[in-house]
Image (cartoon, rainbow, N blue to C red):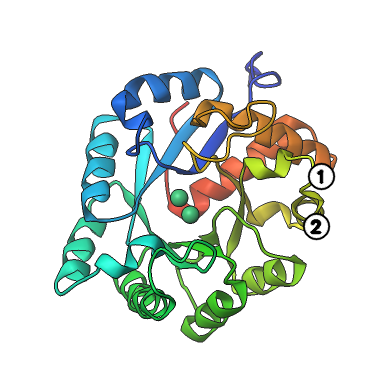
C-alpha cells in the first residue's frame, strides 16, 4: 500500500463539539467548514441547545456531509422546557444526521435556569437518550458531584457518552471512565494556568479521549479571545499530543477513531 505523503504532516481530526448554528458561525457555515477541512478537520458534530437552535443545526447538517448533530435542551435552557417540548425534541433526535442526544446536564456556574429545574430536565433527558438509543453528550459545570451521581444512577449507557469540555478533577474523570464514558478536551488545555486539565489529559486512556472546540467559545492559544471555529482545533490537538508525549499524527488518529466509534460515523477522506 502506498503511503499518502500528506499523512505525516496533516492531522485528521474530528471536532466532537461545535456550535455552527450559533452566531457568528451560522452566517456562513459552508465557509467555516471549508476552513476546517483545509486545517485537517474531517467531521464536526454541531450541537443544538433548544428547539429553535436544533432546527438550525439540522439544516446545516442536512446541507453539509461532514457535519453531524447533537440535539437536546442545554441546562441553560431547562427553564423553557414546557409541556410537549421533550416530545418535539425526541422527534428531532430521530433525524438520521443526529449522532448523539445532548448536550444535557447541569450548569451551576451560570445558573441560567433554577437548579431544581436543571436537575429535573437532566433526569428526563437521560431517560429519553436511553430510549432513542443514541450516545449522550454531557455538559457539567460546577456540578460534577451532582451530575456524576445522576449518571451513575442512570447507568449503564449501552451507547456510551462523552463529558464534553471537561473541567472536573482527576476523580471525576475516573468516575466517568468507569461508566464507559469518553472525555472531551477543549481549547482550554492550551491555557497557561490550566495544569489541572493537562494532568488529567496525561493520564487518560488512548481509547477514551476526544477533542473539541466548543466554538464559537474558548478559542485555544495562540488565538485565545478570538471567535473560535473548528479550523483552530489543531492547536488543541498539538498541545494534547505534547502533554501525552506522542506525535500529533498519533493523537489525531486516536481521537478521530474514538469519535467515529462513539458517534458511529464514517469519515470522508
Ligand atoms: Zn457545553
Ligand atoms: Zn456546547
In this rendering, the answer to whether 116 lies above or below 43 is below
Disc 2 element:
helix
Q: Where is residue 56 in the image (x, y as percent from the top left)?
A: 24, 41
Q: Position of residue 143 (x, y in %)?
A: 57, 71
On the rendered structure, is 187 left or right of 80? right
Task: Name the residue nearer the viewer: 265 or 116.
Answer: 116
Q: Label 2 belongs to which residue? A: 203
Q: Label 1 belongs to which residue? A: 244
| Gap in angstroms between the C-alphas marked 2 and 1 | 8 Å
Task: Judge whether residue 266 can be spotted in this image.
Answer: no
Q: Residue furthest top?
A: 5
> Which residue lies at the image location 46% right of the left edge and 82% below the top edge?
154
Q: Toward which corner of the image does residue 75 lie, by quadrant?
A: bottom left
Pointer 2 or 1: first along the chain? 2
Q: Residue furthest right?
A: 245
| Circle on res. 170 | none
Amino acid at each position: 500500500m502506498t503511503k499518502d505523503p500528506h499523512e505525516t504532516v496533516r492531522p485528521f481530526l474530528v471536532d466532537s463539539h461545535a456550535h455552527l448554528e450559533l452566531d457568528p458561525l451560522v452566517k456562513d457555515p459552508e465557509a467555516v467548514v471549508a476552513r476546517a477541512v483545509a486545517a485537517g478537520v474531517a467531521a464536526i458534530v454541531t450541537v443544538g441547545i433548544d428547539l429553535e437552535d436544533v432546527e438550525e443545526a439540522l439544516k446545516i447538517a442536512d446541507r453539509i456531509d461532514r457535519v453531524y448533530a447533537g440535539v437536546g435542551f442545554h441546562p441553560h435552557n431547562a427553564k423553557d422546557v414546557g409541556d410537549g417540548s421533550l416530545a418535539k425534541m425526541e422527534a428531532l433526535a430521530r433525524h438520521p444526521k443526529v449522532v448523539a442526544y445532548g448536550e444535557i446536564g447541569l450548569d451551576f456556574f451560570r445558573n441560567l435556569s433554577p437548579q431544581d429545574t436543571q436537575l429535573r430536565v437532566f433526569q428526563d433527558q437521560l431517560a429519553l437518550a436511553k430510549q432513542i438509543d443514541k450516545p449522550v453528550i454531557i455538559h457539567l459545570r460546577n456540578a460534577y458531584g451532582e451530575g456524576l451521581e445522576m449518571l451513575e444512577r442512570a447507568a449503564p449507557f449501552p451507547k456510551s457518552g462523552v463529558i464534553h469540555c471537561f473541567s472536573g478533577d482527576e476523580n471525576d474523570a475516573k468516575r466517568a471512565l468507569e461508566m464507559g464514558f469518553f472525555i472531551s478536551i477543549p481549547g482550554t488545555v492550551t491555557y497557561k494556568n490550566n495544569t489541572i486539565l493537562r494532568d488529567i489529559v496525561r493520564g487518560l486512556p488512548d481509547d477514551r479521549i476526544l477533542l473539541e472546540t466548543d466554538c464559537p467559545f474558548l478559542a485555544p492559544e495562540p488565538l485565545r479571545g478570538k471567535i473560535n471555529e473548528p479550523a483552530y482545533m489543531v492547536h488543541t490537538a498539538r498541545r494534547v499530543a505534547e502533554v501525552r508525549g506522542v506525535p500529533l499524527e498519533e493523537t489525531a488518529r486516536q481521537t478521530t477513531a474514538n469519535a467515529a466509534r462513539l458517534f458511529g460515523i464514517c469519515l470522508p477522506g
